[in-house]
């Protein structure tokens, strides 16, 4: 019998790559998409009969319970979330509903199955806020400074509680920034890479950005999803940081992206004070040593190669 997995947020970057990864390993995959999502992403279209899509609201405990009981997965990958920081600030109530209540409903539905599935939760480095230690690892204190980080801190603690109180095989993957050509339009990497391609093609004249000195630990989403899977194959459940351990600035990102299309970013980028965030964490850089030691997971894709790939993909779509 094929192993069966349920992926929430399957229409997003991580969910679509994970679905492809699991189906290539002979999994039967069930994916949850939002009621408001009129059609799944195009990159799910070719996955065939191994993929079954379901529509449900994670905030509806009855709907989640029915879905989990029907799919009866051996593994659950909970990737769905309100993950854009600016959107979370604008609508904190909906962010809490999606990120916290959705996680609670899934954990409870999973716990009540006759055979309790292994559970992966996509947490975030934003739970660390402005950390006092660098790099950050699984023992770093949780001190979020924005609403997105607060909601994910709560959901992270829920997963830990269900692991410790109920003995569930429940894992938090503490994810630092991870990108790909499928990254959503609201993220600065995609914004920059698409702008570089559009300006090169003559479709756009300038790009407005906020803090060019901001730094992030950016990795490749396609490597991260392998770690998700590896964490559920481990002998024991634990939390893992997935990161590269390297920092890059937005300015460095601009140099690579615009350089890929032979442009000087300084001639096209305008700093807009309205785009500056007062609750943006600084110096978030992860220590993935535990994932390397326990899972054999290592981030290998060079940052410059990843950004150039995103620019070329954006140019091909233009």
Image (cartoon, grey):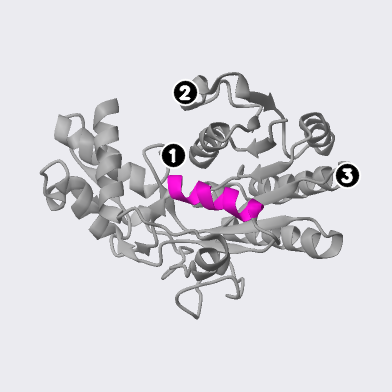
Q: Which residue is mark 2?
A: 42
Q: Position of residue 174 (x, y in %)?
A: 56, 60
Q: Position of residue 28 (x, y in %)?
A: 65, 29
Residue neighbourhood size for the residue with mark 3, other residues' Cα within 10 Å, grouped as few (<14), some (14–19), many (≥20): few
Q: Disc 3 and disc 1: Cα gap in Å?
A: 34 Å
At mark 2, the secondary structure is: helix
Q: Is residue 183 left or right of residue 50?
A: left
Question: Residue 60 falls in which quadrant of the image?
Answer: top right
Q: Position of residue 7 (x, y in %)?
A: 64, 38
Q: Is residue 139 left or right of residue 198?
A: right
Residue neighbourhood size for the residue with mark 1, other residues' Cα within 10 Å, grouped as few (<14), some (14–19), many (≥20): some
Which residue is depicted at the point 51% across and 60% down?
Answer: 296
Q: Is residue 155 left or right of residue 141?
A: right
Q: Is residue 23 left or right of residue 105?
A: left
Q: Which residue is mark 3?
A: 112
Q: Is residue 315 visible?
A: yes
Q: Which residue is mark 1?
A: 184
* Comes first in the chain, label 2 or label 3: 2
Q: Is residue 125 visible?
A: no
Which residue is depicted at the point 54% across and 63% down?
Answer: 291
Which residue is depicted at the point 49% across and 64% down?
Answer: 279
Q: Which residues are magenta?
A: 222-233
Q: Nearer the viewer, residue 15 or 209?
A: 15
293 is higher (above) or lower (below) than 194: below
At mark 3, the secondary structure is: loop
Q: Quadrant of the N terminus?
A: top right
Q: Quadrant of the C terminus?
A: top left
Residue 51 within the magenta-colored segment of the rendering: no
Q: Nearer the viewer, residue 121 or 127?
A: 121
At mark 1, the secondary structure is: loop
Mark closer to the observer (2, 3): 3
């Amino acid at each position: 019998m094929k192993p069966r997995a349920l992926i929430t947020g399957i229409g997003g970057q991580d969910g679509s790559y994970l679905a492809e990864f699991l189906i290539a390993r002979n999994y039967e995959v069930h994916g949850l998409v939002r009621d408001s999502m009129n059609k799944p992403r195009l990159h799910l279209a070719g996955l065939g009969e191994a993929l079954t899509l379901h529509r449900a609201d994670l905030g509806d405990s009855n709907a989640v319970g029915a879905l989990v009981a029907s799919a009866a997965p051996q593994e659950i990958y909970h990737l769905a979330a309100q993950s854009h920081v600016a959107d979370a600030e604008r609508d904190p109530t909906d962010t809490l509903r999606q990120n916290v209540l959705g996680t609670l409903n899934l954990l409870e539905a999973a716990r009540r199955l006759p055979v309790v599935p292994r559970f992966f939760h996509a947490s975030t480095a934003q739970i660390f806020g402005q950390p006092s230690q660098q790099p950050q690892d699984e023992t770093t204190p949780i001190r979020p400074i924005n609403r997105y980080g607060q909601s994910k801190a709560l959901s992270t603690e829920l997963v830990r509680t269900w692991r410790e109180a109920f003995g569930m095989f429940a894992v938090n993957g503490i994810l630092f920034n991870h990108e790909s050509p499928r990254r959503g339009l609201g993220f600065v990497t995609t914004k920059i890479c698409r702008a570089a391609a559009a300006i090169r093609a003559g479709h756009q004249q300038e790009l407005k950005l906020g803090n060019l000195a901001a730094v992030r630990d950016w990795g490749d989403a396609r490597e991260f999803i392998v770690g998700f899977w590896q964490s559920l194959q481990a002998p024991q459940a634990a939390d893992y940081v997935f990161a590269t351990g390297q920092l890059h600035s937005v300015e460095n990102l601009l140099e690579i992206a615009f350089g890929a299309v032979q442009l000087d970013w300084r001639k096209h980028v305008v700093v807009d004070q309205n785009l500056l965030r007062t609750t943006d964490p600084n110096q978030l850089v992860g220590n993935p040593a535990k994932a390397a030691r326990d899972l054999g997971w290592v981030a290998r894709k060079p940052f410059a190669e990843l950004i150039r790939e995103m620019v070329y993909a954006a140019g091909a779509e233009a």
